[in-house]
Image (spheres, rainbow, N blue to C red):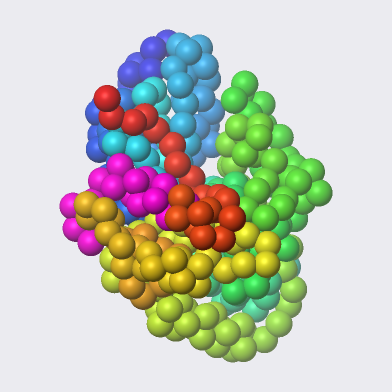
Amino acid sequence: MELLDLEKHGIDIKEQVPLSKYTFTKTGGPAQYLAFPKNETELMQLVAVAKQERVPLTVIGNASNLIIRDGGIAGLVLILTAMNQITVTAEQVTAQAGARIIDTAFTAAHAGLSGLEFAAGIPGSVGGAVFMNAGAYGGETCEAVKSVRVLTRTGEVKTYTNEEMAFSYRHSLVQETGDIVIAATFELTKAPKAPILANMHYLNALRRYKQPLEYPSCGSVFKRPTGHYVGPMIIQAGLQGRQIGGAQDSTKHAGFIVNKGGATATDYLNLIHLIQKVIKEKFAIDLQTEVRIIGQATD
C-alpha cells in the first residue's frame, strides 16, 4: 500500500502544506505530506505505511515550542491534535497525546484533582509536554506522570512507567528512541476544587503579565543554565529588543522571541545564533535551545 492509498480508508493526507499555518511562530516551510490521524488505529496505519514505503516520518504536537526551518519537512508529518480525549478515573487522568495540557490540567481541577496546576498556561499538547518534560512555575510534567503509552517506529505499542521514561530537565526517553506518545496517565491527589482553580487562574494572570502573548512566539527559547537566568543575561548583553527581519527578542520578556510581522524561521534562527554568540562572549556560557528546531534549511 502506498501512502496516498490511505485516503481510500478515510485518512486525509494533504501534500505540500505550509506548516506556518500550524506553528505558534507562524513560520516554517511546507510538509511534503501532512496527516491528522483521528485515533490510534489511523496512527498505526500511517506509521506502518511510512515504514513500508521508507518515507521519513515526523511527529509534531501542538507546534508551540517548535521552529520548523523554511525548507520544510520531507516525508510524512503527523499532527496529533485530533487525538485529544481526556478521561478521569478515581485519582488518575489519562489524556491522548493531542489533547492540550491546559485542557488536561483544567479537567483535573474540575474533578478535584491537584498536581497539574503548573500546566495551566502551557500551550503545548500532552505528547509534547511528555516529550520535553515541559514545566512552568516550579512544576514539571514528570512530577505528575504515572505512565506513558507509546507507539514505536516499528509499530509496537509499549507502556513506560515514570521511571522508565528517564525524565530530566526538558528531556525524556522518547527523545532518544523516537517513540510516538499515544497517551499519558497522570497520578494526582484529591483536593478541594476552588483552591486548585484559584491557583491556576493566578498563574495564568501572572503569565499574561510577564509574557508577550500578544505576538506569535515559540515560548521560552533557551534552557536555563545552572545558576543563571537567561532573560537577565540577554538584557545585560544589550540584546533585548534586537530584531532580525520580523523576529524580535521580546521587549516584555527577554527569554522570548516574537514574530513582529513577516518573520521567517531563518530570522528566528539568525537571532538565536546571535544571542548565543554574544552570551558566550560576555558570560562564557553556552546557551542551549529549549525550543525544538527541525526541518530543512532553504537552499
Instruction: Identify the image quadrant of residue 64.
Output: bottom left
Q: Residue furthest right?
A: 163
Instruction: Identify the image quadrant of residue 175.
Output: top right
Out of 171 and 76, give the one closest to the viewer. Answer: 171
Whether residue 268 appears in magenta in the rendering, the answer is yes
Say which quadrant the N terminus sits in.
Answer: top left
Asked whether the viewer can see residue 165, the reply is yes
Out of 271 and 111, give the one closest to the viewer. Answer: 271
Residue under the image location 65 percent in, 72 percent down: 138
170 sits left or right of 40 in the view: right
Q: Residue furthest left?
A: 262
Q: Position of residue 78 (x, y in %)?
A: 42, 35
Q: Position of residue 11 (x, y in %)?
A: 37, 30
Q: Position of residue 186 (x, y in %)?
A: 69, 60
Whether residue 171 appears in magenta in the rendering, the answer is no
Residue under the image location 39 percent in, 51 percent down: 274
- Magenta part of the chain: 260-276
Q: Main secondary structure of the magenta part?
A: helix
